[in-house]
Image: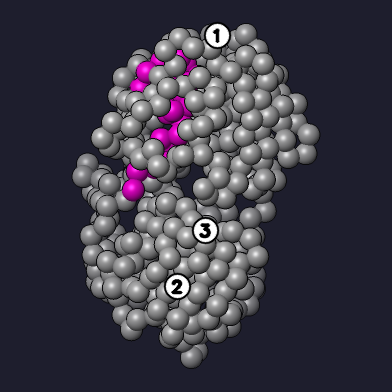
Amino acid sequence: MGGRKLEGTIPVSGAKNAALPLMCAALLTEAPLQLTNMPTTLGDIVTLSAVLGELGVRTAIHKDEHTVILQAKDKTSCHAPYDLVRKMRASILVLGPLLARHGQAEVSLPGGCAIGTRPVDLHIDGLRAMGALIELESGYIKATAPHGLKGTTIVFPKVSVGATENLMMAACLADGCTVLSKAAQEPEIVDLGECLIKMGAKIEGLGTDEIRIQGVEKLKGTTHDVIPDRIETGTWMIAAALTGGKLQLKNAKLDHVTALVAPLEEAGLIIKQTGTDIIVSREGRPLTGTDIMTKPYPGFPTDLQAQFMTMLTLCMGAGMVTETIFENRFMHVPELCRMGANITVHNGSAIIRGVNSLKGAEVMATDLRASVALVLAALVAEGETTINRIYHLDRGYENIVDKLRACGADIERVK
């Protein structure tokens, strides 16, 4: 039931998109890797744990302590099966570590959200440049490195977070120096690199578009604290703007969402960093239409596009959203229009003209970020909204019902 301002405190969980590659890094050593501030209840964490289990990784998940301990001491298999990998694209990140440490890997082509083709060719091309022999057969990537991986210079034709992560991990145990040019610069990349350095890797250039990795003979275990989830942080910032309430976001980094700050301030939100918290409110100001264009980090994140569009549905005037990362990432538009939004899509851009109110309706989530966009819409819609297929939501947002309820939302999960 919509119509309530969100007021209160929300603890931001550890970043899913940092946690998943960090878990795969456990494959690079036989020593234990302990990850703290982990979003332990997320569906993707459970799925990747199962994938790693198939590969011989012992995983202990301590949900209450938000800690995961992984140890890849005994290799039982280098085969990551379709039944598990199809559920989540991040499973492809086992490919580089397996190949680097064991010289072989057989990984199913991945699944995940249906928001575009998102091919894995950059992963494969990079590993081939490092000396791997790779064939695609029966839906599997079958790779061997009979003489080990060799350091080389790889220039990405386009920015790829996953390929940067996979090749950076593989390069840690390669022979010689690997240079990743036009590499992704996301905070999650930096977090992974900092953990690998604690494990004994030699990495320079984190946070820039050129990362240099000098291969070492072996890595050791370590303990690493996962960064807060910048997409969750941005989602709650948008929720405060949309509902007109005031939220204190615990354990959140404003410097990880800088591309979101300016358009939110332009739309009317007041944003302050206080210690490790972010405080956001609109203080009675009207929502004003503004434009965004998604770009690789440090540009506006594609993972916040749907949420921002939802906010624009109730703005004064109009705003434009241009999506440049994924070709199918406007699938939430028909569902928002069912709730009364005025949105016109033309190719990769959408014009959103503000309306007086949204109306509760029965809607369907199509992917992870679209699902939370519909939750945001439901928070301000008149009447009751039912959101179906929320398993997408459970992949990326930890305890979302409890967090929203604690701030005054009328929301419940229906079995």
Q: Sequence order check: which comes first, mark 2 or mark 1?
A: 2
Q: Name the image quarter holding residue 331.
A: top right
Residue picked out by circle 1: 382
Residue 308 lies, with reference to residue 140, above or below; the image says above
Q: CA distance from mark 3 to mark 1?
A: 41 Å
Q: Sequence order check: which comes first, mark 2 or mark 3?
A: 3
Mark nearest the camera among 2 and 1 is 2
Please give the range of residues in magenta: 227-247
Q: Which mark is residue 339?
A: none
Foreground residue among 83 and 39: 39
State the image coordinates of residue 407 (x, y, percent, origin top left): 34, 19
Foreground residue among 77 and 337: 337
Q: Sequence order check: which comes first, mark 3 or mark 1?
A: 3
Foreground residue among 217 and 103: 217
Residue picked out by circle 2: 212
Residue picked out by circle 3: 184
